[in-house]
Amino acid sequence: MRERSGPRSLTVAALTVLLLAAPASARTITLTAEDCDQIAVICAKAPRLSWAVTQNAAGTFDTIPQLQMFGHLQQAVLIRFPVEQIPRNQRVTKAELTLQVTHVDQKARLRVRRLQAEWGAGVCHQYRMAHPQRLEWSQPGAQGSPADRAAKDTAVLEIGAVGEYTLDVTEDVELWYTGATANRGWIMNMENAYALYLPSPYCPPSGSGKQWKLRITFEPQ
């Protein structure tokens, strides 16, 4: 004997069809500086150093859990996040870079741009790499545009107080993910202020790199 379908069974069938037809939901991943495969802090006053994070004395720099950027030192942070960790055949819908400011004098401006030139081992203010061969930036400190860095800012962050700041970097991450341009990471330069402090992007004992966050949301194409 065949049972007749009732309202309940019809409702369940309809919901199943809708669920199967609906697109997969968006996903979000968070990368931190601890995931990065390339980081450097370069400095005009120490043109051959790759890690000029904190100046203890004239010409003497140290690695501690704090990045101390001073205007007269002309420092720049170079950092590359591995956006290749996003699964294939996705569409990037949102990407945000979050930084934690722990000290600022006056009002600082932080400029963020995509790096265009390949850089690597031995990178410093003078050279974009020292191994396997020495190659200079088109302008010292990766300031040449567009050879060293993109012609326009990805973001300009006005910093007037201690706290967390978030930048929209969706366009850059999408360009890197699709392969429209090579992922060389970002360069960050500080302007206008005497001093700007952030957690060091690389200091495993303190875990300060976890405070540099790139949050990416994506969905199937």
Image: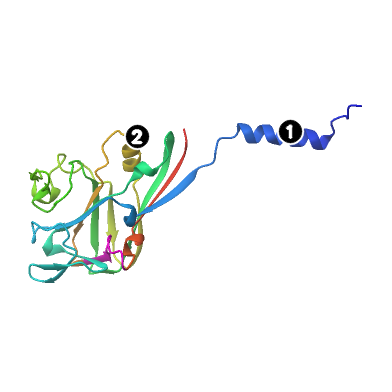
Q: Left or right: where does residue 187 sit relative to residue 207?
A: left
The residue segment tinted magenta is 196-205
- Main secondary structure type of the part rendered in magenta: loop
Residue at 31 percent across and 42 percent down: it is 172
- Could you tell me how many numbered marks the image carries? 2
Which quadrant of the figure has residue 206? Answer: bottom left
Residue underneath mark 1? 13
Label for residue 178?
2
- Of pointers 1 and 2, the one earlier in the residue sequence: 1
Is disc 2 surrounded by few (<14), some (14 to 19) or many (20+) residues within 10 Å? some
Q: Mark 1: which secondary structure? A: helix
Estimate the x, y position of residue 143 in percent, counting from the top left: 13, 48
Q: Nearer the viewer, residue 87 or 15?
A: 87
Q: The N terminus lies in which quarter of the figure?
A: top right
Q: Nearer the viewer, residue 108 or 42?
A: 42
Side of 73 where 16 appears, left or right: right
Q: Position of residue 173 (x, y in %)?
A: 34, 42
Q: Is residue 121 left or right of residue 201?
A: left
Helix, strand or loop for disc 2: helix
- Give the residue at x 36% y 60%: 210
Residue type at the position of mark 2: Thr
Residue 114 is drawn in which quadrant?
Answer: top left
- Nearest the viewer among 215 and 193 is 215
Amino acid type of disc 1?
A: Ala
Where does the image place residue 49, in percent across and percent down from the top left?
Answer: 12, 58
Is 95 placed left or right of 56 in the picture? right
Look at the image and name its color scheme. rainbow
